[in-house]
Image (cartoon, coloured by chain):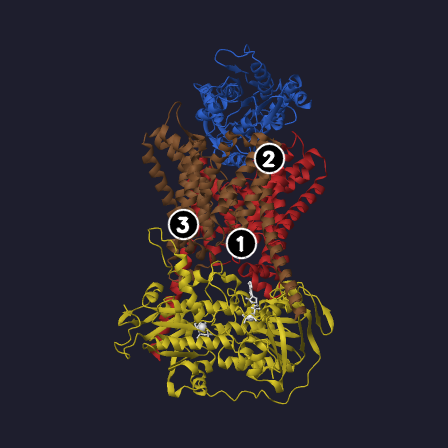
Chain colours: A brown, B yellow, C blue, D red
């Protein structure tokens, strides 16, 4: 765990302690379970985003993808009576295709990631709204899918299964990002794509793979979100989720210039954001301030991190100066 | 395939180029060029800036494809190579411009794209094996840093060592080095030349591009000279000498260089003076240094001795952590490069691509940039004033370009360097700091730049020239200051000039 | 928490002025219920997930009763039931009859739509073509109002030809009206289904100089809407009574928690009817509104 | 006018012609006036954004700033009874301060523009919602400010004054961006900030000035928007306007990497976007497809532009090669 991640972890614990002191109900198992459920949902989304950000890209369409794929998933199983495992596979495949198309436009046709995914943001939500004719996709009364519901919204030993899914995904993705050749290529491309190309790396494919991973994880979280809300109005479902995901990554030490960040960081970023949301509700802060609190904490977090880096560099220098002066005096 | 098996026939070319032609809009970079490379041969490739050397190498590295012509490797003809094909046939390439990942460590960079893998489908990096593979390579290039140092923490020269180690790590049959010594000081250069000889002994071919002709003389078996994208001539081992190369490169003999040991000049008044200045790289080592009007003060030292850092402080990019600066006897406080420029202190930085010029702007726009208000009426830029200034510099410096509206990014390295010089010469320098001013510059242009520096000094400008090229330091300077680990270890006057003295000071010893 | 009084929460479906009157109702009820802490909560976005989370957190914080205007009641059955299993859950504004909610207190959007039809019929005895404007076409309250109005207009010569959505972007709401004036010159009547739609219609018509020549049917009681009614340029408006929902609802919830279930009718439906406010009633209504929020 | 701008203009005219053929009412003076009013409003916003984008930055908070400053403006004149010219000056000053703070955080504290302005997006809207306690800021019935209304929502010779304001601002800003020393510095910094610094440009100040310009223009457009809707619910007012502005700039040929784009381009981008919105209403396309149409057109526009660039570059090369071959043959 890097120093940065450790700092974030400490921040999370300090905030948690303060909230628990003010309102001890914060530590109730039910509250922790509720919050960790959302951490699971947003965490999966944020890991996907992180894979794109590490290449120096950005994926602005995730909120809309969550809306579109969620709508389709519910429609498939609730209206069209598809078997849910089939629907599940279809949705994940759609996520992969969306990622592939984005990656293709970005790497082959050399469009900017911001532009491609901004268009995605506009288009996918529009399609979802058109698909439901601006209505709502939801289950009919009494429509139940026991296994699916257990896997997505259920709990095992009191722990939400969505959170367990996040832990599993995080471990796999940690290995991929930090131990595999593919992960190393991602970092390299994020820092210097040209050089990676000169080294014989098929950078296009690697970047495309990053978008596909993002698409798949987004699709997965879309299913989780759909099963959490059990109802989707495409006009608003998942709105701003791309900002949550990006914010989690940024808080977790990712640079939008690419080539920086760790998987533990993005998870901790998600945890902090969800803790903040929980705190606003538990401490009775007006919900209108919810986003403001989130924005304020991100800003302060990034600022402290940045200033801490500057401070450390300076202290190192002063230390060196002192040592050298002492050495010179001794000579 | 056993790459070191050269016994087949030593004379069968490993690689040959035939009638290669490459054009860029407005420029013919290569024109009907042919050459061969035989196993175990060291070829020196020389030519003026923009002669087409890098273009040629880029074709071999698969980075660009020729318009016409064929590249034959191992008897298989290609219209153009891809990067993979090039790597696959055993061609290793150290680019003129560095291409490292500063967020990865040295080991990761050296084996980038060829990581040792653990068994399994996930393609996990075998980090232990990677470390054992890197150690001997670093030793071979004489690196003074460890394999897990992040590249961001290395100096430019150290990064170049990493690049070379990388080329060595490929079980290559041909190693291409595009100006590998341009920022390497003496000792490291020697090591590199030894490395080249060792490669040759292993039967590996080397193409060595350099503007430092004496280095070429020392290692090359054959010299290929390029001029204006065409083959100007080939010199066999016995015929390789400095003057012959120069003649082929520029089509005439260079006039005898102005003798360095003319009558010593009378030193002028102190222009820029550093009193116990502490740079961020060596905060514990105060620097005292005076640069006088009308002199060229050479600043020599080993890799990472802190010369660039000092120049950055003089130019206001970094702030001094203590001590004081004076300009013409008055205290000088620099908050930014803009302050330095306002005071007439200019810097030609060592990293051209990143800090020297704006590759996307035209020559004219680059030259006017530091002095834009002077090219403007009521804050509106006058294109004609810009063009006029740029035309003047283009003629003065002999910048080779279709016009001053050409994008600087398309110029060859040497011509880009001239643009950097041009932008400062168009203003009135009081103190001119040049960090490796002739890095990557051909011999003809070098002489011109030396002349320019001398003219500046004669006009009363204080010139501080940082250089790792020993010949240059001794040949051009009026005085030489030598840095060792962030401090000035000594200053040599003209009568003390010698390679030994500079070297002794550079390693922290006093000359006899 | 310092005071250990039980808390009752009124959770709305999104930030809107509409709920200001409910806030006043909550305030009035608080005055009469000193044993409880009453609060009104806005979710930061109009979305099911966010509202669900807000309610989960309220339950965690120990709230004893929640009255909610669910963002999407039809399909949120499980989520609402989860809340209902831990607190006393009441619904308001739009009902979720399939859930285990104790009671619904509010108006009927279908009836409100029918009242809008009444206004139109009265204002245009010779028939006409109506265009509607609404924030979210897909939202339940919008669909019910539109349906109610269509039902009410059935068999007359008045027709609701299209309803344009604006995603609650007021700039788009106004432009939609302007564009409609261009695209459909034969329109004789405009309906603003959301509280801010009517004032945007009013302003666009004023800018185009068509005030008075096009019949405007309004919903809710935005000050501009009421001003238009008074001026005669808005035919009439259908108002709901969120003040009463909140006031009566909170009191009902308090007595329910104390064990007094007499206030809950059999089906759990407590309809507080919507009213048509025309030129004659507008002054009294406005004065009443002022009195309510003025305390 | 560059080739890129010309292409965009042609696209606008073609789309306009098609719409006019399908529904001739498109060309009614009243429709043109209505649409050009919105072009004025969004154009001012987009020019501000363009100044930031040219430096390689981004300003994601403009939508929230439009909400916050609009709320304050209406509150100042409608509730607090400030003279409107005073309120106007105050709001513009606030816009400048917001820009200054963003610029300061970005240039002095070295935070990433995306992060700073993302936090701004979250914070300003939160503040606005808190300020009105999640209510609406609006005028009372009959509250009138004749001069202000004339300047903001009035017409002169049938042309909306907001559009005239845009034209004036565009001309001034065109000179600033394309002819002034400051404009050249902006381009240089966008291309390579480090090299600009080494050329003695005070890059920090120049970038800060760009954010201040953006802040001021955003404040101005906030006032225009406020006077257009005459009522603001801070929870939704101006939402996604940053995307409109960025989209207009991107359509107009700006690169989010900085250093590219023309003022005419961003205006044409705005025109196209508003034309599309108008078209959706006039052709009776379902409103749910509004955003999808916008996204689709941006994507196609950027694609065509990009492919056209590739094609032209290739043709140039072929031409050069042919010429050179011919030259060689002649020798
Ligand atoms: N991408 C490009 N676009 C346009 N012209 C180019 C491009 N790359 C190189 N050139 C031109 O091709 C010619 C050959 O350049 P090249 O870089 O091969 O020279 P060089 O011999 O390596 O010079 P130097 O010693 O300065 O490095 C020059 O005139 C240069 O301006
Ligand atoms: N970005 C950096 N981070 C950490 N250390 C650095 C960095 N850049 C340079 N250094 C260190 O600072 C010292 C001085 O480097 P500098 O580049 O000034 O040396 P120099 O004498 O100019 O050598 P060169 O021949 O490389 O130009 C070296 O030890 C180098 O490793
Ligand atoms: Mg070269
Ligand atoms: Mg140096």
Disc with the residue nearer the chain's start (2 vs 3): 2
Q: Which residue is identified by label 2? A: A19
Crowding at mark 2 (Cα within 10 Å: few <14, some 14-19, many 20+): many
Q: Give the secondary structure at mark 1.
A: helix
Name the front one of labels 1 and 2.
2
Residue C191 lies, in percent from the top left, at 52, 27
Q: Is residue B209 visible?
A: no
Crowding at mark 3 (Cα within 10 Å: few <14, some 14-19, many 20+): some
Q: Which residue is identified by label 1? A: D264
Q: Does the beta carbon of the residue at mark 3 sit less than 8 Å from ligand 2?
A: no
Q: Give the secondary structure at mark 3.
A: helix
Image quarter hosting the N terminus of chain B: bottom left
Determine the image quadrant of residue C250: top right
Question: Residue pushed farthest top?
Answer: C262
Residue B369 lies, in percent from the top left, at 59, 66
Image quarter hosting the C terminus of chain B: bottom right
Residue B494 lies, in percent from the top left, at 62, 85
For the residue pair C64 and D213, the one nearer the viewer reads as C64
Q: Which residue is identified by label 3? A: A176
Determine the image quadrant of residue D219: top right
Q: CA gap, disc 1 to disc 3?
A: 46 Å
Q: CA gap, disc 2 to disc 3?
A: 35 Å
Measured along the vertical axis of the image, is residue B38 above or below residue C120?
below
């Amino acid at each position: 765990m890097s120093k940065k991640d450790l700092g974030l972890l400490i921040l999370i614990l300090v905030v948690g302690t303060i909230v628990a002191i003010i309102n001890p109900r914060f530590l109730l198992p039910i509250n922790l379970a509720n919050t960790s459920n959302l951490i699971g949902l947003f965490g999966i989304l944020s890991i996907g985003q992180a894979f794109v950000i590490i290449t120096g890209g950005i994926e602005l369409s995730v909120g809309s993808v969550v809306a579109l794929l969620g709508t389709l998933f519910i429609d498939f199983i609730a209206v069209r009576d598809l078997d849910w495992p089939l629907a599940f596979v279809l949705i994940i495949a759609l996520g992969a295709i969306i990622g592939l198309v984005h990656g293709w436009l970005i790497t082959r046709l050399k469009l900017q990631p911001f532009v491609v995914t901004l268009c995605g943001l506009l288009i996918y939500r529009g399609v979802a709204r058109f698909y439901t004719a601006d209505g709502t996709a939801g289950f009919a009364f009494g429509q139940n899918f026991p296994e699916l519901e257990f896997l997505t919204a259920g709990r095992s030993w009191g722990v939400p299964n969505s959170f367990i899914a996040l832990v599993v995904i995080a471990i796999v993705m940690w290995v991929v990002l930090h131990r595999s050749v593919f992960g190393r290529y991602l970092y390299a491309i994020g820092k210097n794509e040209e050089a990676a190309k000169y080294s014989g790396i098929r950078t296009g494919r690697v970047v495309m793979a990053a978008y596909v991973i993002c698409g798949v994880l987004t699709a997965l979280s879309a299913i989780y979100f759909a099963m959490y809300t059990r109802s989707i109005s495409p006009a608003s479902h998942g709105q701003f989720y791309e900002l949550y995901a990006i914010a989690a990554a940024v808080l977790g030490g990712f640079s939008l210039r690419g080539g920086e960040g760790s998987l533990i960081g993005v998870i901790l970023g998600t945890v902090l954001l969800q803790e903040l949301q929980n705190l606003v509700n538990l401490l009775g802060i007006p919900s209108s301030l919810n986003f403001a609190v989130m924005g304020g904490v991100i800003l302060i977090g990034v600022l402290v991190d940045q200033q801490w880096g500057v401070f450390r560099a300076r202290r190192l220098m002063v230390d060196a100066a002192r040592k050298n002066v002492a050495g010179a005096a001794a000579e | 395939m056993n790459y070191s098996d050269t016994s087949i026939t030593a004379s069968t070319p490993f690689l040959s180029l035939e009638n290669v032609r490459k054009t860029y809009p407005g420029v013919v970079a290569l024109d009907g060029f042919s050459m061969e490379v035989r196993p175990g041969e060291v070829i020196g490739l020389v030519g003026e800036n923009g002669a087409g050397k890098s273009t040629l190498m880029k074709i071999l590295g698969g980075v660009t494809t020729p318009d016409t012509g064929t590249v034959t490797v191992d008897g298989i003809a290609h219209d153009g190579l891809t990067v993979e094909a090039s790597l696959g046939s055993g061609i290793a390439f150290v680019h003129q411009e560095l291409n490292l990942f500063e967020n990865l460590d040295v080991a990761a960079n050296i084996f980038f794209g060829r990581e040792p893998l653990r068994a399994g489908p996930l393609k996990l990096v075998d980090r232990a094996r990677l470390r054992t593979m890197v150690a001997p390579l670093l030793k071979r290039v004489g690196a003074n840093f460890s394999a897990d140092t992040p590249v961001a923490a290395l100096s430019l020269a150290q990064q170049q060592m990493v690049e070379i180690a990388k080329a060595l790590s490929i079980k290559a049959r041909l190693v291409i080095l595009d100006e590998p010594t341009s920022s390497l000081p003496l000792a490291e250069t020697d090591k590199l030349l030894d490395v080249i000889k060792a490669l040759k002994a292993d039967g590996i071919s080397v193409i060595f591009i350099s503007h430092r002709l004496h280095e070429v003389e020392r290692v090359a078996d054959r010299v290929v000279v390029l001029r204006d994208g065409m083959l100007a001539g080939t010199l066999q081992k016995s015929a390789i000498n400095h003057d012959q190369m120069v003649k082929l490169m520029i089509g005439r003999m260079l006039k005898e260089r102005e003798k360095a040991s003319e009558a010593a000049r009378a030193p002028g008044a102190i222009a820029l003076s550093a009193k116990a200045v502490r740079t961020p790289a060596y905060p514990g080592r105060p620097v005292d240094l005076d640069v006088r009007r009308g002199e060229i003060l050479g600043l020599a030292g080993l890799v990472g001795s802190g010369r660039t850092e000092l120049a950055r402080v003089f130019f206001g990019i970094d702030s001094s952590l203590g001590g004081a600066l004076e300009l013409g006897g008055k205290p000088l406080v620099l908050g930014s490069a803009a302050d330095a420029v306002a005071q007439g202190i200019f810097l030609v930085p060592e990293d051209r691509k990143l800090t020297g010029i704006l590759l996307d702007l035209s020559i004219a726009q680059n030259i006017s940039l530091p002095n834009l208000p002077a090219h403007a009426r009521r804050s509106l830029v006058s294109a004609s004033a810009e063009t006029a200034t740029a035309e003047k510099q283009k003629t003065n410096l002999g910048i080779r370009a279709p016009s001053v509206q050409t994008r600087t990014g398309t110029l060859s390295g040497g011509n880009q360097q001239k643009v950097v010089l041009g932008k400062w010469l168009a203003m009135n320098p009081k103190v001119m700091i040049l960090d490796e001013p002739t890095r990557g510059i051909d011999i003809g242009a070098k002489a011109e730049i030396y002349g320019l520096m001398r003219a500046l000094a004669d006009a009363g400008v204080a010139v501080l020239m940082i250089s790792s090229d020993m010949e240059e330091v001794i040949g051009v300077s009026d005085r030489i200051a030598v840095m060792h680990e962030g401090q000035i270890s000594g200053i040599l006057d003209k009568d003390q000039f010698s390679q030994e003295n500079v070297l002794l000071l550079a390693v922290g010893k006093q000359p006899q | 928490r310092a005071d250990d009084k039980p808390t009752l929460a009124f959770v709305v479906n999104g930030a809107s002025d509409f709920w200001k009157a409910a806030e006043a109702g909550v305030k009035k009820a608080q005055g009469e219920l000193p044993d409880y802490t009453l609060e009104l909560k806005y979710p930061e976005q109009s979305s099911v997930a966010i509202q669900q989370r807000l309610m989960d957190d309220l339950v965690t914080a120990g709230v004893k009763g929640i009255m909610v205007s669910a963002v999407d009641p039809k399909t949120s059955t499980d989520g609402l039931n989860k809340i209902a299993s831990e607190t006393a859950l009441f619904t308001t504004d739009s009902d979720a009859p399939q859930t285990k909610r104790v009671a619904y207190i509010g108006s009927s959007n279908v009836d409100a739509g029918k009242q809008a039809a009444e206004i139109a019929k009265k204002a245009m005895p010779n028939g006409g073509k109506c265009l509607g404007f609404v924030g979210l076409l897909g939202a339940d309250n919008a669909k019910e109002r539109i349906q109610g109005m269509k039902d009410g207009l059935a068999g007359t010569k008045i027709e609701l030809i299209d309803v344009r959505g604006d995603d609650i972007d007021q700039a788009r709401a106004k432009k939609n009206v302007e564009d409609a004036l261009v695209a459909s010159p034969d329109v004789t009547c405009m309906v603003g289904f959301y509280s801010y739609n009517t004032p945007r219609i009013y302003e666009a018509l004023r800018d185009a100089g068509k005030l008075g020549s096009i019949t405007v049917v309004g919903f809710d009681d935005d000050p501009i809407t009421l001003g238009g009614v008074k001026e005669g340029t808005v035919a009439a408006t259908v108002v709901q009574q969120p003040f009463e929902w909140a006031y009566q609802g909170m009191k009902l919830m308090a007595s329910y928690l104390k064990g007094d279930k007499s206030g809950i009718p059999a089906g759990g439906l407590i309809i507080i009817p919507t009213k048509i406010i025309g030129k004659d009633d507008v002054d009294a209504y406005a004065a009443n509104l002022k009195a309510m929020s003025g305390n």
